Amino acid sequence: MTELTTAALAETPEGRRCLQAMQDDPGSALVAFDFDGTLSPIVEDPARAVADPDAVAALGRLGRLVGTVAVITGRPARTAVSLGGLDRVPGLESMVVLGQYGVERWDAATGEFQIPEPPAEIDDVEAALPGLFAELGLHDVHLEHKERAIGLHTRQSADPAGTFRALVEPVRRLAEEHGLTVEPGRNVLEIRPRGHDKGDALRALVAERGARSVVFGGDDLGDLPAFHAARGLREEGLTALLLCSASHEEDALQQLSDMVVHGPSGVAAWTSAVADLLEGRAAAS
Ligand SMILES: [Mg+2]
């Protein structure tokens, strides 16, 4: 009966092994989900991307059964807690939210946010930018200060593409001189600290909690580092199950997944079924 149930919840032997390990020792299990597209449906206005109530409630059920439940997101921790209503959900009383790819943290147990000061290098670079623009003869770059990053927008300049091209290399050199990195986008260069992704965040939390079985659920390319990290943990003797919330086509993620479900409602149903599975085990033992 149990085997039949785990088979329905994971398409791969590795995934089923992880579910078995969770049943055997739920206290050392860690379940972490991305926020947007995984717990909350993607909507036009990101400020209104409230979580699917069923997905959050199901995570709350798991929160009573496993050692650790967490959300790992690129959003600020405060935003995720607020959009998820995570401070009000039964069962999530000890959950952890890692925001800004692990830079920020919220612990439900204490209600405290840990939000570090932006690195001083960001201010140093910002102070150097007007001189650089003058040197390059560029006077129509729009500068956006984003706490832990600086956005340089060329959309409103007379020649967006030309201004962008003129900026790339000098800005990259300036960022590197200050130990920062540059992320190019569409008519925007973002200067930010290096070395934070969801893989780093997941690994650190797994180590902190001494977790032995790890579920991670995500929906897009920002989740790839966490997927790779979880697969790496398998090589270190842990079990891991990768859940893909396929709300929009993301082949790279699906190929690495042990289970593909349809969007946040699929995540809700899956999570609830895992809670059923673990509750069955708890009742039997
Ligand atoms: Mg997402």
Image: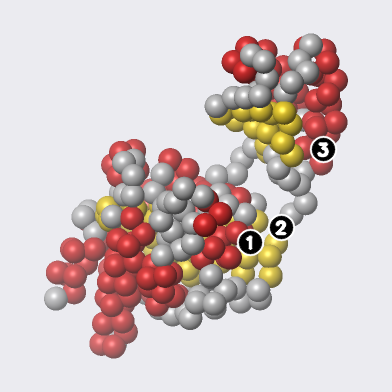
Residue in the image at 30% along x and 61% along y: 266
Disc 3 crowd rating (10 Å Cα; few below 14, some 14-19, many 20+) is: some
Q: Nearer the viewer, mark 1 or mark 2?
A: 1
- Say which residue appears at 77% left-offset and 43% top-offset: 119
- Specify whether 34 is left or right of 20: right
Left-right relation of 57 to 122:
left
Q: Can residue 60 be seen at all in this image of the molecule?
A: yes
What is the spatial separation of the Cα atoms under label 3 and label 2, in whole angstroms? 17 Å
Q: Amino acid at mark 2?
A: Ile
Q: Which quadrant does the C terminus fall into?
A: bottom left
Q: Is mark 2 within 8 Å of ligand 1?
A: no
- Residue type at mark 3: give it: Asp
Residue in the foreground of this view, choosing between 94 and 188: 188
* Cα distance in 3D space between marks 3 and 1: 23 Å
* Secondary structure state at the residue bearing disc 3: helix
- Residue 159, given in percent of the width and then of the height, sits at 64, 14
Q: Residue 272 location in percent, x, y?
A: 32, 72
Q: Secondary structure at mark 2?
A: loop
Q: Which residue is mark 3?
A: 123
The residue wearing badge 1 is 78
Q: Is residue 181 visible?
A: no
Amino acid type for the residue under numbered disc 1: Arg
Q: Which mark is residue 115?
A: 2
Q: Residue at x 74, y 31 (%)?
A: 143
Across and down, in percent, residue 166 comes to 67, 13
Earlier sequence position, callout 3 versus callout 2:
2
